[in-house]
Image (spheres, grey):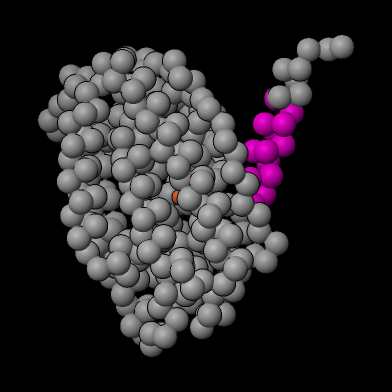
């Protein structure tokens, strides 16, 4: 990947594969099964359709004069995110059918997205690069230790691993678009803007997703300090979803950081070979 004015790049032999798959349309939330994990997964899923549409718009705004290889990656990124939104919408509907009120969350998310889309286009792109780092960090952890995170309340685990694979694959796209769009900026300005944006995005992301998760826990009858402590333990204790991404989050602030500083395509290869093996197993013997 060529991104002008930077020594860091995406791997030149990186391939983005659009895996147009569909998952468990009849997936149901199992009430009472690990309610905290269920609420966190549901809070994330509720944010994806509108959030990912915002990412697409933010990247699209700067795609006109990018190098051809980045333009190709942007096209694949858009297709992947459109598919993710479609599958998470289906999952969100299944959650509603199982009794979660997702509509109230969705309304709030729509307001937050509208607020973001009033910001300058370059800020929206920096926000997208920061949030894509979040999805890539969660995706890495999920694919590396699927057993640590798997819980019946998450619906079909294959939905989450499919999404995680493609998040890793396109983790450099918004960032490379940002590098290209800011290629004439002084390094100090570029570094400080992306890091200030990351700090603000982190605060908002945590506040909003935790608020949504607590709202969902309340729907399960878990409220007050108990709900907060249980959610905090889930995120910071065991399985420690936030605690485990902390080193990677910190890495974003390093001057010269690039999402592909860590090449974790082995996780994609592992997922794809397991998927292929599972499909082969399901083919009836001749
Ligand atoms: Fe996605
Ligand atoms: Fe993404």
Taking the spot 17% from the left edge, 31% from the top edge, the residue there is 104
Residue extending farthest right: 286
Q: Is residue 193 visible?
A: yes
Foreground residue, 45 or 51? 51
Taking the spot 19% from the left edge, 22% from the top edge, the residue there is 219
Quadrant hosting residue 127: bottom left
Highlighted range, magenta: 265-278
Quadrant hosting residue 129: bottom left
Does the magenta segment cover residue 275?
yes
Q: Residue 204: horizontal and vertical position, in percent?
A: 23, 53
Q: Residue 39: horizontal and vertical position, in percent?
A: 30, 29
Describe residue 159's horizontal placement relative to residue 30 as left or right.
right
Q: Residue 76: horizontal and vertical position, in percent?
A: 55, 52
Q: Report the quarter where the N terminus lies.
A: bottom right
Taking the spot 48% from the left edge, 50% from the top edge, the residue there is 78
**What secondary structure characterizes most of the magenta part?**
helix
């Amino acid at each position: 990947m060529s991104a002008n004015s930077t020594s860091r790049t995406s791997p030149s032999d990186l391939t983005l594969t659009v895996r147009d798959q569909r998952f468990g349309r009849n997936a149901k939330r199992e009430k009472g099964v690990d309610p905290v994990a269920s609420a966190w997964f549901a809070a994330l899923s509720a944010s994806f359709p509108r959030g990912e549409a915002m990412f697409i718009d933010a990247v699209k705004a700067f795609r006109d004069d990018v190098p051809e290889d980045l333009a190709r990656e942007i096209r694949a990124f858009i297709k992947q995110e459109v598919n993710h939104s479609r599958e998470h919408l289906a999952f969100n509907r299944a959650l509603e059918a199982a009794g979660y009120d997702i509509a109230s969350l969705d309304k709030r998310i729509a307001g937050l997205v509208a607020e973001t889309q009033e910001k300058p286009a370059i800020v929206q792109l920096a926000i997208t690069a920061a949030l894509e780092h979040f999805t890539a960090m969660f995706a890495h952890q999920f694919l590396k230790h699927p057993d640590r995170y798997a819980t019946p309340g998450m619906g079909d685990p294959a939905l989450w691993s499919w999404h995680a694979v493609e998040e890793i694959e396109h983790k450099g796209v918004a960032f490379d678009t940002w590098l290209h769009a800011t290629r004439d900026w002084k390094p100090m300005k570029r570094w400080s803007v992306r890091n200030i944006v990351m700090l603000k995005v982190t605060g908002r992301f945590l506040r909003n997703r935790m608020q949504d998760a607590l709202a969902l826990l309340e729907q399960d009858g878990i409220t007050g300090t108990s709900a907060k402590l249980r959610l905090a333990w889930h995120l910071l204790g065991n399985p420690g979803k936030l605690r485990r991404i902390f080193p990677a989050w910190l890495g974003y602030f390093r001057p010269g950081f690039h999402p592909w500083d860590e090449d974790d395509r082995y996780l994609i290869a592992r997922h794809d070979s397991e998927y292929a093996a599972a499909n082969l197993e399901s083919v009836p013997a001749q």
